[in-house]
Structures are given as C-alpha cells and as structure tokens.
Amino acid sequence: MTVTRETALRRLDGSRKSLAVAVDLRPGEGIPDVLLRATAVNGFQFPYQIVQLIGGRREQRFSHFGSGKWSLSYEGLGDLLGLPHGDADIQPLLYGFSAKQQVTFFGRNLPLKQLIGHRRVAPASLRTLGYQKAVWHISSLTFDPKSYELLLDHCPVCETRLNFLVARGISFCHRCVDADNPMRPVVDLREFPQGRAQFDDEEALRFATDLVNPETSLADLAKWNIHPSLRDTDPGHLFEFMAQVARAIDFRDGRCGALEAKFSSVGEVSADALSRSARAILGWPDAFVELAESLKDTWFFPRTKDFYSHPLRVRLASPFYAKGFRKLVTSALKLSEKSTPILRRPKENSAAAIVHDVQQTWEDNFRFARASKSVRQQVEQTGLPINTLLLCYSRKGFECPDTIMRRTFGPAVHTFATINPTRRTRGRYVLSLRDIVAALFSGAGNPWPSVLEAIAQDRLPLVKLSQQPCLIDSVGVVDFKPLKNFFRENPVGCDQDGPPIIGGEAGFHLNCSIVQISNLVAARLLPSGKMPISEVWAFRRSYISPKEIACRLLMNGEFARPNIVGAELNEGGIKPIVDSVFVRSRSTVEEFYGERLRQF
C-alpha cells in the first residue's frame, strides 16, 4: 500500500480511529472481503469487533447478502482501514437496496438472492492473489471469471460451509483448528485447487461474466457491441435473465434436479449452459429465438396458467425487469412459440386448399394446433389439453375450430357447445367430472375422447356445478352408476402409445396441479421436458393420490377428504414414495383399504 502525504496526515489525526495494520482495497473486493482480511491481519477473531470500533452492532451480518439486505452502515470504515480518501474510497463498494428486492452491485442491479450469505473461494486464485473477490459470491456463478476454476464453498476436510463470521485468515477453514491452540487454523484451502469449469464457448462466457464482474467497468461493456435494442438494458438485468435461461437449459439437459418457485431464486447454473445462454443474447434476436424454441417444452416451476405458453414467460412477470425489456423478450418468445408452422394458411382472397404433398404426422398436427389461436381458445374454454382435443378431432367426434385444420380432420358429429347441462340436481355426494374420471379409470390410454362422445350422446348425465368458464371444471356427477358401468365396459382408452406430452398435459391426465407435477418431475418420478405418454400411463397404474382415494371412498358412500386420507395412510405406515410428493403405491393402498376402495 502506497502511503501518500494525505494518507499519513489522516492516520496522524487523533480524532480518527485507525487499525494498527492499514489495509488497502484490492481489485474486485467487496466490503465483506476487505473486512475479513482486515480482521485477520490485525489479530481480531471476529469481524464484528472491527465494526464495533465505528459504532456498528455485534449482530450485523457480515456477508455479501447481509450487506445488501440490511444496508449495513460502514461510516468511518475508510479511515479505520487507513484508506487514502477515507469513506470516499469505500463508497463504490456499498450495496444499495430497493423495495423490489434489488441490490446495486458495483453499478449493476441484481436480485438480492443473487448474493449468497456464505463464503466461496477459488483456491488456486487465492494462492496467486492473496485475497478473495466479490464476484465469487454471485449465486449463479460457480467458477472464477478469470481462471474458470470452480469455486469451493466448504472445507474439504470437515465439510463445514465457509462463512464471514469467524476470521482465521481468508485462506483457511475457520473450524479446523489446532487442538492445543484454537487460534491456529490447520486446513489451508489453497492446498485444494479445484477443477476447471466445462464449456465450449469461452467468448460468450466471458461476456456473461463481464456483465457482473466488478473488474470490468460499465464503460468497457460497450466493446461487446450487442444488439441496439438491448444496449440500454441494465447489465444486471441482462445477466439475471441469461441465468434464468441457463437454468432452463440445465434442467432440460438433466443437470438440475431442483425446481425454484421464486422468481429471483435462480441458484447455481453450469458454465456450459451460461455460455449458451450468453451466445443467444450476443446473436439477438435470431440466435435467441432458436434457443427459445428448443426450450419451449422444458417443464419447470412456476408456470403461467396456460401451460402451452413458453416456460420463460413467467420469469418475465417478475417486477425485477424493466417494462421495455419484458416487452422485447416476450416478442421474441412469441416468435419461438410460433416458429416452423407445418401447415401454411392460404391468403384471405385465395381459395387455395392445403396441398397434401407429405403425409402429416401427429407431431405436425400438434405443432400447428399449438400455434392456432382458435385451438388455444378451445383449450381455455374446455379445459382439455391439445393432445386430447386432437384425438377428439381425429375420431371425428368433435369439430375442430380451426378452418385450416378442419380440412385435415374432416367433418365431425358433435361440437363442444352441445355439452351444456343447465339443470343442477342436489344429491348426497357430488364429484366433478375430472375427479370421477381420474378415480374410475386407472388403465392405459386416454379415456376422455370416448367419455366426451358419450356425454354428447346423452348417455352419461351431468349436472351444472358452477359458472366456471372451463367446461370440465363447471360440470359434475351425482349419479355414479352410469359412469361406473361405462368404465366397466371400456377399461382401455385410446392413444396407449402415442407421441410424447408436456408437463401440463400430464397434470391433466393425472388430475394433479402444476405444482404437484413440478414436484414429481423434480423427484425424478416423471421425466422433464417432453414425457413419453406410455410413462404417464405407467405412472398412473403404479401410484395413487390421496385425492383419488377420497373420490373412490366417496363414490362408495364414505365421506372423506384428501388430508384425512393422507393422515390415515401415514398412521397405517404407508408413506409417500418420496417425502416431497403426495403419491403412494397403488397396490399397497388398494390392499390396505380392500373393499372400501372398489371401483365398480
């Protein structure tokens, strides 16, 4: 540290407190990093002892997350450390916190959850530099931006997570100490160098890390020459969205098993996924649209109510992003959802029909239906997923609302508008149509097309339950006998070995909520992304939910609720397959209840 005349005069000023050993600021350090280093070199054991010298509280949280969350006051710290210009030198290192859970990180706006509350170090870099960096404590980064060495957040010997609470020296584990001298650490983290992060596109990864690296000034970011529409976007916002995209890539590729339920909780992402996400931003908009198209069937929570919308759309709903950025990315996501339509619509003034040069596959029809506004509207009106609607069209049971697709499927016998029960009958027990179908049918295949055709033919009576806009949720059953007879005669559904489906469709067939499906995917009981439909049928044959059990008990005259059923099963020693999910073994449950759970 160079001692100038001004520095010397400040240290000689008796009104200013100063440490015995002055500490300078190193490139890329944050205040928690400087404090930890100053604590060790001055012989203190705890960082709060230094902060108490400037009037701070003992309970202050000394971490990057804590500095952002609680806007800790460090007035007088500059002089205490012996910095040339006092507090003016540490001003750029302070984290500002806003009501939107944003924190200012060296001029970038990041979600608070991007700052972790513990320590991470790059052992080889620590040996070379002799200090730790603030960028190592950004949640989504798992490596050092310069050397690409993977970061270490726990002691390799005792496996204790590193923290900022105790100072044994920045290069040592705070818990592993000499038995005869508790102040002497014995595990040097520098002796445990980590491997190099795996990725293929170094240029793109460098772009991603420059967005949040304090050692890259905001002015230097102009060298990347990104698309003009993105240049005014806050670098922190851009990095956060790239991390969200990288998270989706990791989940799709099987590298991520945990699903995050909060907008800002991205968590760690792989260097490879981050580089691919960054390359898509560098190639905006075409490269991003191409990547977004490959992610549109990736299933991770949370999702919008429309499970056919792009999974990244819900991330943009976060108040963290500026309105202009949300609008820009939403437009690109819409392009990815509608890309590569299989059937081409004729011009309005043209009488041209579709030319069937190539036999259309089910996947072709699905992709076109997904891009069709009228089919998507029917999904909302009926509550039926696209794969079930396509089966209804192909069996010529119900008319397709899309005029172009209708030419492919031909005329139909019924329309969904004919299913409109107006009479509400009071009965002892009433079940929704969705619940009773899930309770009575546990075989292979999709039962809904045949059930809906029977309803349209007045063979299965329904009653009106509510004024819900969705058909399936607005009708119910009081007389269970006709449906029991129907499923006794029709034990197998159609589409037993059809094309893959997405998570929202699986939730419909298993009568599960979006959150429950997400938990099943996270527990590896269902695959992520597109699911082979045979696996969904196999899951239905193997497992049963408390909701289905309650419905079957109700049909047999025994009132029950899912929570009561769950408690009864737990008391009987029948636990869920995995702690985080709700399902149990179907065979075990049916044996436990016996005749009480009969279907017919």
Image: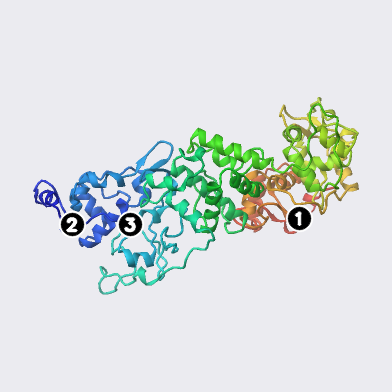
Residue ID for mark 3: 164
Residue ID for mark 2: 2
Q: Residue furthest bottom?
A: 180
Mark 3 or 2 closer to N-term?
Answer: 2
Which label lies toward us, 1 or 3?
3
Whether pointer 3 and pointer 2 mark residues with C-beta atoms closer than 8 Å, the reply is no
Depth check: give the residue in front, 160 or 23. 23
Is the residue 169 above or below the residue 248 in the image? below
Amino acid tagged 3: Phe
Tell me the colour scheme of the image: rainbow
Residue 139 seen anywhere in this rendered image of the structure: no
Instruction: Locate residue 465: give its quadrant.
Output: top right
| Residue density around tag 3, few if under 14, some if 14–19, many if 20 or more, within 10 Å | many
Position of 6 with respect to 241 (left or right) is: left
Amino acid tagged 2: Thr
Amino acid tagged 1: Glu
Q: Residue at x 88, y 43 (%)?
A: 486
Position of 352 with respect to 288 (left or right) is: right
Q: What SS does tag 1 mark?
A: helix
List x then y, in percent, for residue 382: 76, 34
Position of 111 with respect to 166 (left or right) is: right
Q: Residue at x 20, y 60 (%)?
A: 42
Depth check: give the residue in front, 411 or 259. 411
Is the residue 314 above or below the residue 47 in the image? above
List x then y, in percent, for residue 581: 62, 52
Mark 1 or 2 closer to N-term?
Answer: 2
List x then y, in percent, for residue 192: 40, 71
Residue ID for mark 1: 590
Is the residue 480 above or below the residue 10 in the image? above
Residue 276 seen anywhere in this rendered image of the structure: yes
Q: What SS does tag 3 mark?
A: loop
